[in-house]
Amino acid sequence: MRRLSYRPRRWPDVSADLLKLDPLAAARRGFMVVVQDTRGRFASEGEWEPWTYEESDGYDTVRWAAALAGSNGSVGMIGASYFGNTQWMAALSKPPELKAIAPLITWSDPDDGLFSRGGAIELGITVPWSLMQGADTLMRRHRTDLDGLVNGITGLVRDEVRFTALPAPGRLTWQSP
C-alpha cells in the first residue's frame, strides 16, 4: 500500500524506481496494490494539513485494505519521502494487520531533521517544500479564479519571506531572524 500526498509526474514514482517495485507488475504477480491519496489531496476528500491526520488515517486505511475482498488480511506499506512518513505514522497507530513497512529517504521523527535539527529550523527543507505544496494547493483551489490565485501566491511568498527573514532586494547577505 502507498499513501500519497503528491503525485509523481510519471508512474511508477521515484520511490518505486529506487526500490525496483513496479505496482502494476506486483499486481500481475498476485499482490493486491492499494494507492491512496492522503486526506484533502487529489481524489480524497477533506482538507490537507500535512502530518496532521497521517496516524489516524493510516490506521483506518490499513484496516480497510486488509478487509478488501481478495486480501489475505496482511498489509505492507512502501514509499519514500512523505510517502515513507505515512508508513511510520500508520505503524505508530498499531493496526494489527500492518505486517511490514519499507520507508525510504524519510524521517522517523519530523522534529529531528525535517522541521528542525538541534533546535534550529531546517529552512533548506522546510521553505522549498512548503512553497511547493502551498503553490500546488492554491493552484488547485483557485483553478478558475486568476485573481484569487495571484493573491494567494503573493500571500504565500510574503509569509515565507517574513518567516525566513530573507534579505531585502539588493542585499547579498542572509542572516537568521
Image (cartoon, rainbow, N blue to C red):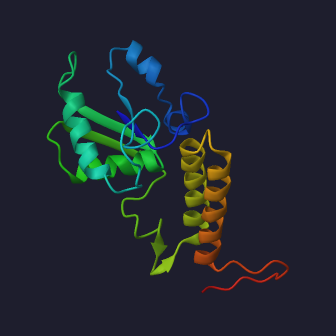
Point 82% across, 83% down: residue: 171
Work out which residue is located at the far left of the displayed protein and give it.
96
Work out which residue is located at the far right of the displayed protein and give it.
170
Measured as percent of width and height from the top left, residue 11 is found at 55, 27
Point 77% across, 83% down: residue: 173
Q: Nearer the viewer, residue 28 or 161?
A: 161
Where the C terminus falls, by quadrant? bottom right
State whether residue 29 is above or below residue 74.
Answer: above
Kindly indicate the quadrant of the structure image that contains residue 106: bottom left
Kindly indicate the quadrant of the structure image that contains residue 57: top left
Kindly indicate the quadrant of the structure image that contains residue 166: bottom right
Point 58% across, 76% down: residue: 163
Where the N terminus falls, by quadrant? top left
User: How many numbered circles does the render carry?
Assistant: 0
Residue 158 visible to an observer of this rendering: yes
Q: Which of 169 and 16 is in front in this view?
A: 169
Residue 104 visible to an observer of this rendering: no
Measured as percent of width and height from the top left, residue 15 is found at 51, 39
Asked whether, in this view, residue 139 is left or right of residue 111, the answer is right
Measured as percent of width and height from the top left, residue 98 is found at 22, 39
Q: Which of 75 and 36 is in front in this view?
A: 36
Measured as percent of width and height from the top left, residue 105 is found at 49, 51
Asked whether, in this view, residue 86 is left or right of residue 22, the answer is left
